[in-house]
Image (cartoon, rainbow, N blue to C red):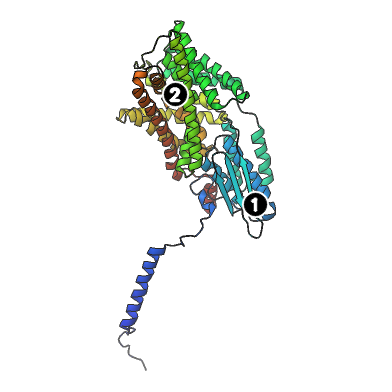
Amino acid sequence: MAVKPGPATRPITLPGAAQSRSNYAAKRVLRRLIQGDAPPTAPMSLVERLAGSPYANPTIRVDAVEDSARKTLDFALELAESLFRYGAGALEVETSVIAVTASFGLRNVDVDINNQSVTINYAGPYITPITVLRVVRSWSDNYAALADLHRLVSDIIVGDLDRETAAIRMDQITSRHKPFPRWAVRLAAGGFTTMLVLTMGGGLVAALLSFVTTALVTVVEQRLGSWRIPEFFSRAAASALIAGLAQVAWVSHVPVTQGVVIAGGLVLLLPTMRLVSATQDAVNGFPVSAAGRYLSAMLVFAAIAAGIAVSLVVGVNLGVPRLDINVMIASTFPWPVILVLSVLSAVFIAITLQTRPDLLLPTAAVTGVAYVVMMGAGWTGLGARLAPAAASVFIGMAARVVALRMHAPSSVIAIPSIMFMFPGMSIFQAVYGIAIEGSNLAAGATALFNALTVILALAAGVVLGDNLARPFAKGPGERRRRNRRR
């Protein structure tokens, strides 16, 4: 017998039950708003610090790490010391240490970086905590070794190297001769200042004098360094020598402009790499390291200003005619020629910094496009200060993308590429106004402050561009994970 379907029935909901569920939902939403998704004191995994860095998503080994923890820490400490010695920033050192230790199986690692020291602490389960410390006391311009260490860390995090093989490779990198001999570095330093003098309108005679002066300055600095003379006095002596030779040429009726020759040599003495690293450390949350680098850079600026001031005062007392610092000299070359000169200056300074030979062409390409960006920004009305800043942002972005594809840190391309924009003439004019023209002291101090502002803006622009390029530049760990998903 078929049963006739009746009307659909619904469960009876009591008013008290509906009110209870409504109160529970409201309390749940309120609890989420107040507490958040995680407890406020939950520790953050240090491996998360690698997010956005070239060493994100490392391959982690978990087999037999406790019995070799000390060897892994010693390897990481030596790596950190080498990176610091060759000019890496604090963030790069920290991420390298975290990536290497995590890849070798040590997850409970704390890294503390100060201006000249690195401390690593490992507190694994069921073992006595281990703390190692290393102080970095020596520095060297060796971009080739810095790039090779970057590639070493990249090979470690993708699982291609064990610790023993990695230690052997690091010993080879740190003991390897620099790619360019001393005579090539001296010629490149002279070529760099020669290109700058030509771009500033100094003429061929001034460019030749600048080449000879720079060659002598590099010899003097190397000799003072071998005598363990502090950097403050060696930079002061170098800047005084540059200003002194320019005055001698002027008294000898050599058709040159003193200011242009001195300005070209000043750019070579500026602590460019230190300023960029200090700005990067300040932005990335390393105030102690940033303060130390900024103080060191300011001391170099003071040494340069003191050396020039002493040389100019001595020259004036000996009868050297005073200069008209308000006279501005413009280059007579068309902008395509200045573009070529700027590119050559970047190549020469890259050789001076001992970069890898295969990175010279990418550095030249980034510099050339950056000059075009600066000219375009100037034509749009950004002005003489904002146009170089815009070009430095582009340099930071392009350097990160290109350098990661070349298995190198971005600084090895960014630093040589921004050197042609540094205001050497403004610094000289400011120092001359302070040291010689006492009545124009306020104007000289203002000019010096403006020049330092431009330099810091260039450094900040590079750091900004580097951060903006993070979504477009993937490290080896992220590329390996993407290939596995495919």
- Residue in the image at 56% along x and 46% along y: 112
Compared to residue 320, the image places residue 150 above or below, namely below
Q: Earlier in the sequence, mark 2 or mark 1?
A: 1
Crowd around label 1: few <14 · some 14–19 · many ≥20 (10 Å): some
Residue 269 spot, x, y in % from top left: 50, 24
- Residue in the image at 34% along x and 19% along y: 439
Pick the front one: 446 or 404: 446
Residue 475 spot, x, y in % from top left: 52, 44
Residue 130's mark? 1
Mark 2 lies on residue = 342
Q: Which amino acid type is shown beneath numbered disc 1? A: Ile
Alpha carbon of mark 2 to alpha carbon of mark 1: how far?
Answer: 50 Å
Compared to residue 19, the image places residue 455 above or below, namely above
Q: Nearer the viewer, mark 2 or mark 1?
A: 1
- Residue in the image at 36% along x and 67% along y: 30
Q: Secondary structure at mark 2?
A: helix
Residue 223 spot, x, y in % from top left: 61, 20
| Any part of residue 370 in sight | yes
Question: Which quadrant of the view contains residue 368?
Answer: top left
Compared to residue 41, the image places residue 135 above or below, namely above
